[in-house]
Image (spheres, rainbow, N blue to C red):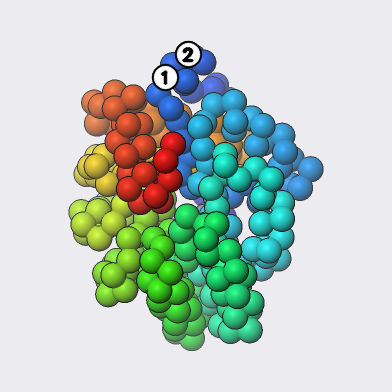
Amino acid sequence: MAFDDSNKSVESTEMPGFNSAELREINLIDCHAHMELYRKSDVEKEIRKAKSCVRAVFDSMTEYRKAHVHKSWELLKNYFGFIFPTLGYHPNEAKRGNWEKVERVEEFLLDHAKEIVAVGEIGLDFYHATADRERENQLKIFRHFLSIASELDLPVVIHAREAEEIAIREVERAGVEAYFHAFAEAELTKSAQDAGYIGISTGIAFMPQVKRVAEKASVERMFVETDSPFMSPFKGMTNNPCNVSVAVRELEKLKSIEADEIMSAVLKNVRDFFGVEL
Ligand SMILES: [Zn+2]
């Protein structure tokens, strides 16, 4: 999740240019979102909207302040089958080094290990953790969850910000399959794709650094995502999985690859990585 990028979106309220027949044909999937983080009264409405245009949503339920994973689970479990859950511990929570909380989340994760498709999001966020102590806490807790994923033989969804290089190294050391979500460090695109998969977010519409990643990246190791309700490509709006079409459209332009080809690559990656047949 990203908490402070939504105000930089482009000014537009137009919906992206796929008609409904096209949408059905290209099989859109949102590979990373947080449906549990909408206002509680909006959750059902947003999921209904998502169902109208994407085939599946991969939801990273991650412990962060009062967004407890057990509450997110209760909120979304009736939608499983359309929503595929992952469970994790957000780096912005991890920086506080609350190991009692880590234990509680770990217990919940282990109890649901058979129902989740990955561990995440977990990772490192040195943009929000500036003190050495906070970064140490993040790294220790990150490693802890990497080892849990490794033991469970599950892939990981990674949030890495201003710490991408270390995150890549840690993932390689842990020997787990990784998805670097909302990847925005162009120089490290190849290393990230050598170590795992990268996610191109709807931020591609308004963040030049995401465009640069997309230019360098191969669709063979790529996911598309909205990070809803964050990262809306429409200024002042809440994001929804339907807007994943914006990322696909931008990729189409940037890489001269047709939308349906992009989505069939993504679908293959979803099957290989999450082990989900769609
Ligand atoms: Zn996220």
Q: Element type at marker 2?
A: helix
Foreground of the two, 118 or 15: 118
Expressed as whole percent of the image width and height from the top left, the position of residue 43 reads 71, 42
Q: In this view, does 164 lie above or below 11?
A: below
Q: Is residue 180 above or below residue 111?
A: above
Foreground of the two, 10 or 75: 75
Foreground of the two, 21 or 137: 21
**Residue 239 found in image quarter:** top right
Q: Is residue 166 visible?
A: no
The amino acid beneath tag 1 is: Glu
The amino acid beneath tag 2 is: Ala
Locate residue 256 relative to residue 163 in the image: left or right: left
Q: Does the residue labelled 1 lie within 8 Å of ligand 1?
A: no
Expressed as whole percent of the image width and height from the top left, the position of residue 150 reads 38, 71
Direction right: furthest residue: 41
Residue drawn at x 43%, y 69% is 152
Q: Tell me the CA gap for discs 1 and 2.
A: 6 Å
Q: Can residue 66 be seen in this view?
A: yes
Which residue is tagged 1?
25
Q: Element type at marker 1?
A: helix
Residue drawn at x 53%, y 41% is 57
Pointers 1 and 2 in contact (C-beta within 8 Å): yes
Q: How many marks?
A: 2
Foreground of the two, 28 or 249: 28
Q: Is mark 2 within 8 Å of ligand 1?
A: no
Which residue is tagged 2?
21
The C terminus lies in quadrant? top left
Locate residue 238 relative to residue 88 in the image: left or right: right
Other residues around mark 2 within 10 Å, as few (<14) / some (14–19) / many (≥20): few
Locate residue 232 relative to residue 184 in the image: left or right: right
Expressed as whole percent of the image width and height from the top left, the position of residue 132 reads 44, 84
